[in-house]
Image (cartoon, grey):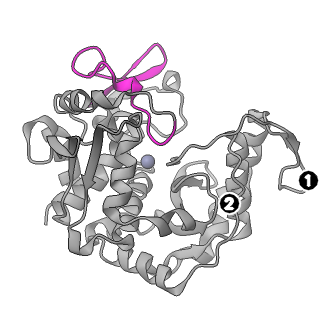
């Protein structure tokens, strides 16, 4: 599960849940989680009507049940956002369908049965969100993606990536970051959507695979860590927490990397953080935040840069002058073991 922007409220009033028969106090995490676990959208039978169309047609305005579920999740997380169905323009629908259409066929093949579709809402409380669906045996079998329609209207691909990569650092007029993920001539909304979606699709593809422990499973509950081969390249469990193998050596400030809300790093630390990152096997800084994000960031950057041959670079600047340029690790020894897993899954065009 993933949320890209974190907005939270300090107000926790008593409220009625949107489920007509039950209600929870907003601070009652267990009650809200129970309503979510038992929600109609967690069952595969709910999704059949969305599932039986080609992949690039699986884009929908979120139905009321999905909106209700996201609302519960926002309440559980203390977010004030109240999701509602957007009026989606034809242009936007064309952009998102075309963005999906251009995704490599190897990715579409992996997605087919697992990918329910993309559901658009307003006021999601984030840019993107992915959650799992279970079969009668309680096994995770598929996933759906929710995207915020209003948020996606705003930025081109490079504007979005620059904004995202700037968020871990406190604002300072001297230091800046520029991220480039799309050539200038095609730097538009459609390719921002495609990149954001590919990250979420990485989460979808991880369902029922052992790239990393399942989302939501407490580290102390993991039975056999040896089976998570991708995870094991960078992570371990210590004192019931996931920590990276680099925390005590090459990347001591990793735990201070917080995206979207509540920057904990000073801007003058940009250069050092990215130099530290080059001594790890994380492909991006966001990958260093959590095991699931490590997988999704590895997936999106591999598909985007290696399979689709699109650019990726992060430039760190002082007063507008580039002082450091960070590039992806695909093709270099530091990420060779992770690349072997991705290459086996996706091939190389
Ligand atoms: Zn993610």
Name the residue rendered at 30%, 55% in the picture.
300
Height in image: 121 above or below 255?
Answer: below
Q: Specify whether residue 210 is in view.
A: no
Mark 1 CB within 8 Å of ligand 1: no
**Disc nearer the start of the sequence (2/1):** 1
User: Which residue does the numbered mark 1 point to in the structure image?
Assistant: 21
Magenta extent:
233-261
Q: Is residue 250 magenta?
A: yes
Real-space Cα separation, disc 2 to disc 1, in angstroms: 17 Å
* CA neighbours of label 1 inside 10 A, class few (<14), some (14 to 19), many (20+): few
Residue 234 in the image, given as x and y percentages of width and height? 28, 29
Height in image: 114 above or below 203?
Answer: below
Magenta stretch, main secondary structure, is loop
User: Which residue does the numbered mark 2 point to in the structure image?
Assistant: 41
* CA neighbours of label 2 inside 10 A, class few (<14), some (14 to 19), many (20+): some
Name the residue rendered at 50%, 76% in the picture.
58
Q: Specify whether residue 265 is in view.
A: yes
Which of 36 and 27 lies nearest the eye of the viewer? Answer: 27
Quarter the C terminus occupies: bottom left
Apparent side of residue 56 relative to residue 31 in the rendered image (left or right): left
Would you identify the image quadrant in which residue 124 lies?
bottom right
Residue 190 in the image, given as x and y percentages of width and height? 37, 73
Residue 263 in the image, given as x and y percentages of width and height? 45, 33
Residue 112 in the image, given as x and y percentages of width and height? 41, 69
Which mark is on residue 200? none
């Amino acid at each position: 599960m993933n949320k890209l922007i974190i907005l939270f409220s300090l107000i926790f009033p008593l409220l009625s849940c949107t489920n007509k028969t039950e209600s929870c106090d907003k601070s009652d995490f267990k009650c809200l989680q129970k309503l979510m676990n038992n929600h109609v959208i967690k069952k595969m039978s709910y999704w059949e009507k969305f599932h039986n169309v080609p992949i690039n047609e699986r884009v929908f305005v979120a139905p009321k049940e999905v909106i209700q579920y996201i609302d519960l999740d926002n309440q559980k997380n203390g977010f004030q956002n109240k999701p509602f169905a957007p009026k989606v323009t034809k242009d936007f629908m064309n952009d998102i369908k075309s963005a999906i259409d251009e995704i490599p066929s190897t990715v579409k093949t992996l997605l087919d049965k697992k990918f329910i579709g993309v559901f658009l809402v307003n006021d999601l409380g984030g840019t993107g969100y992915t959650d799992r669906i279970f079969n009668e045996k309680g096994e995770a079998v598929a996933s759906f993606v929710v995207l915020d329609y209003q948020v996606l209207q705003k930025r081109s691909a490079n504007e979005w990536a620059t904004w995202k990569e700037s968020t871990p650092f406190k604002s300072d007029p001297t230091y800046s970051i520029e991220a480039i993920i799309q050539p200038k001539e095609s730097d538009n909304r459609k390719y921002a959507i495609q990149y954001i979606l590919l990250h979420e699709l990485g989460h979808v593809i991880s369902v029922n695979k052992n790239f990393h422990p399942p989302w939501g499973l407490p580290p102390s509950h993991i039975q056999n860590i040896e089976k998570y081969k991708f995870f094991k390249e960078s992570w371990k469990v210590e004192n019931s927490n996931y920590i990276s193998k680099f925390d005590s050596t090459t990347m001591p400030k990793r735990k201070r990397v917080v995206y979207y809300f509540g920057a904990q790093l000073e801007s003058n630390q940009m250069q050092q953080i990215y130099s530290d990152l080059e001594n790890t096997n994380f492909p991006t800084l966001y990958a260093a935040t959590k095991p699931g994000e490590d997988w999704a960031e590895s997936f999106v950057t591999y598909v985007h840069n290696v399979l689709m041959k699109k650019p990726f670079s992060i430039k760190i600047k002082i007063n507008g002058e580039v002082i450091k340029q960070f590039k992806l690790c695909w093709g270099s020894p530091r990420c060779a073991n992770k690349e072997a897993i991705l290459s086996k899954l996706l091939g190389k065009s």
